[in-house]
Image (cartoon, rainbow, N blue to C red):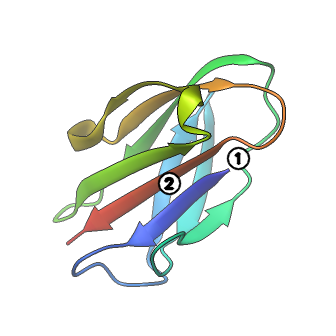
Amino acid sequence: RICQVAGSGAVAGKSFSFTVAGHTVSVPAGPAPGGYCVGAATFSPGNETVTQAIPAGDSVTSIKTAPASRQVSVNVPSGQVTVDIGPGDTRVTYTDAS
């Protein structure tokens, strides 16, 4: 799942776009700590990169993966995280500020 939190100055309900494995997913920003989440899709086990299309005037302030052990790499300023998709739920939570 991909989750979006409305951080400092960000508007709750604002839609954010993410790309994962060639699919675009739109997620509305929700309140902290968990925000709102959308199921991205069902993927085969292995590494997948999630990239946020960062809106003009916004910045990504945090990217967290649950379980944390599934995070392979992260680049917060670029809005990109690579996760190891495994059995069960893998959740990536972004926080943006305006």
SS category of the residue bearing label 2: strand
Q: Position of residue 46 (x, y in %)?
A: 69, 15
Which residue: 51% across, 78% down? Answer: 30
Which residue: 76% across, 25% down? Answer: 86
Q: Is residue 34 above or below residue 44?
A: below
Q: Position of residue 54 (x, y in %)?
A: 31, 53
SS category of the residue bearing label 1: loop
**Residue 70 sits in quarter:** top right
Front residue of this view, candidates 76 and 64: 64
> Is residue 95 toward the left or the right of residue 2 in the image?
left
**Residue 3 sits in quarter:** bottom right
Q: Is residue 32 above or below residue 17?
A: below
Q: Which mark is residue 40?
A: 1
Which residue: 82% across, 36% down? Answer: 42
Q: Amino acid at mark 2?
A: Thr
Q: Residues within 10 Å of mark 1 (few under 14, many from 20)?
A: many
